[in-house]
Image (spheres, rainbow, N blue to C red):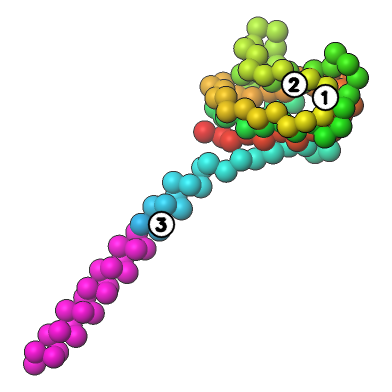
Amino acid sequence: MTNMKNILATAIGVLFMGAGAYLLTAQASTDFGNYEYMYITSASSSATVPTVVSRGSATLGSVVVASSSPANTYITVYDSRAATTGAQVIARIGPTAGTYTFDVFARNGIALDIPTTFNGAYTFTHRRE
């Protein structure tokens, strides 16, 4: 009888530990699901100016300019749902090839103003909040 009590107690303990581990795993995957970075590239984005990247709050991650563009040609990043004159500028990326890393929160959304003279290739990353 004592042996049966020990087996039952062990089985119940294993059951509770398994349930606890499952709940911790489910909570962790739910929390981390919203923090993935998304990206657009010059090949996948629209040719229209401006390009709206996020219509809600987001964090600007990085901009990789893979090939240079003519001098005095800049990509302007706005904290806005549409790149307008009155919107707050959060970044201005020059024509030189390179990786530009940011960690800037945009409350209203993110919009890119890409001039028609900018002919470089780029990849733009952001994370929706």
Closer to the camera, 71 or 77?
A: 71
Q: Residue at 15% across / 84% down in the picture?
A: 6
Q: Nearer the viewer, mark 1 or mark 3?
A: 1
Tell which tag, 3 or 2, sits nearer the viewer: 2
Identify the image quadrant of residue 94. top right
- The Cα–Cα distance between marks 2 and 1, rounded to whole angstroms, is 8 Å
User: At 62% from the left edge and 27% from the top edge, which residue is drawn?
Assistant: 102
120 with respect to 85 (left or right): right
Q: Amino acid at mark 3?
A: Ala
Q: Residue 26 has which mark? A: 3
Is 119 covered by the magenta stretch? no
Q: Rate crowding at label 2 as few (under 14), some (14 to 19) or many (20 or more) other CA atoms within 10 Å.
A: some
Q: Is residue 78 above or below residue 61?
A: above
Quick one: SS at disc 3?
A: helix
**Which residue lies at the image location 27% right of the left edge and 74% below the top edge?**
14
Hey, what amino acid is under mark 1? Thr
Disc 1 and disc 3 in contact, CB within 8 angstroms: no
Quadrant in the rendering for residue 86: top right
Position in image of residue 50 (x %, y %): 76, 21
Which portion, as a residue range, is magenta? 1-23
Disc on res. 96? 1
Instruction: Give the CA distance from mark 3 to mark 2.
Output: 40 Å
Q: Is residue 92 left or right of residue 49?
A: left
Residue at 70%, 8% (x, y): give it.
85
